[in-house]
Amino acid sequence: MTTTTITNIAEFAGSLADIPLKQGCTRFFRGHADYRKYNIEPSIFRKEQLKENEETLIQEAMIRCPNELPSTLSFIEILVRLQHYGLPTRLLDLTSNALVALYFACRENEKTEGEVLVFDIPNDQVKFYDSDTVSVISNIAKRSKEFDLSKYPIDQEKFNSDEEIGRLLHDIQRDKPAFRPIIKRSDLERVIAVRTRLDNARISRQEGAFLLFGMQGSKLKPAAVPDDWLVCGNNEKRIIFSNKHKIKKELASFGVSEQTLFPELDSQAKAIVEKYRNKYARKPKVV
């Protein structure tokens, strides 16, 4: 395995230049703070009590926040908003901007080494928010924890005739009334990349997209990201980062910072306070 340790933006750019984009693919990035402890899985699967209550978490949020989660939204748009506000979902954030991923690799815990993952995802696996496949996979989240494909017939016609699959179809048709009443079993077992509408300031500034995870047999087990999608961050090549504080200062000079990536008032207020706290913490004492 080749591991490259980066200490500045120039080295990062050079490392990316050595990774040619696969033909017929779109490149995405994801940064995380500690390469030794990270698994590629959405937040809903990181704790047992969360994944076993996925549908209840969503229902609670929709009941408590009807103005933020109106019925006019498609279900994938609801999941995106829940992700935005910190509720665990079966989405995993990506970005098409390498510097944004680098910021997230360096954002937290300066004592650990961060990492940027590089994904080359086939173009036919990159869907828009209004895709039929997106609606099929996202609505898995509404199923109970007992939802398991091993319980249902393999035959396509019999599969679609099952009562529980009929409930899934009903939820899909809420999103897409013209959806044909045929669900491909294999679609439920996929991971796809999703581009959503840039109607959210944070997604727009972060040039965001998502991985949407289907199921691996049981709803409680996420589908696996295809091995050939991950071109950096796998067993062959990794880009890790030390000297996070220096890199964040460099990123700020390129317009990539907490203030530019998180435009909401609470984030802006936090960044402003931190700026002046640091400013006066460095001020020499008068003797």
Image: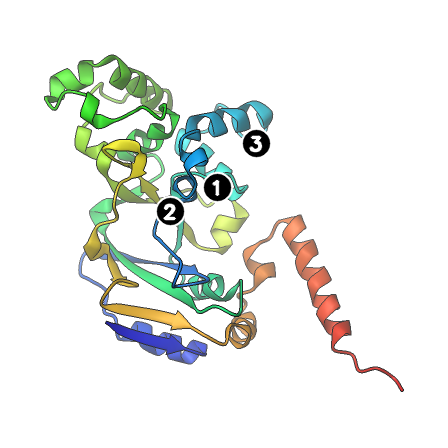
Q: Residues within 10 Å of mark 3 (few under 14, many from 20)?
A: few
User: In the displayed structure, would residue 30 be above or below residue 249?
Assistant: above
Per the rendering, the mark at residue 68 is 3
User: Residue 158: x and y, percent?
Assistant: 13, 16
In the image: residue 26, left or right of residue 206: left
* Amino acid beneath label 3: Glu
Q: How much space separates mark 2 and mark 3, taking CA atoms?
A: 20 Å
Q: How many marks?
A: 3
Q: Residues within 10 Å of mark 1 (few under 14, many from 20)?
A: some
**Residue 270, located in which quarter of the rendered image?**
bottom right
Residue at point 14% right, 20% down?
153
Regarding residue 74, the answer to whether it shows in the image is no
Residue at point 25% right, 26% down?
148
- Comparing 57 with 255, the one in front is 57
User: Does the residue at mark 2 contact the one at mark 1 (Cβ under 8 Å)?
Assistant: yes
Regarding residue 163, the answer to whether it shows in the image is yes
- Mark 1, secondary structure of its residue: helix
User: Residue 171: x and y, percent?
Assistant: 35, 20
Labels 2 and 3: the sequence-earlier one: 3
Q: Residues within 10 Å of mark 2 (few under 14, many from 20)?
A: many
In the image: residue 142, left or right of residue 189: right
Residue at point 32% right, 20% down?
173
Per the rendering, the mark at residue 12 is none
Per the rendering, the mark at residue 83 is 1
Q: Which residue is mark 2?
A: 210
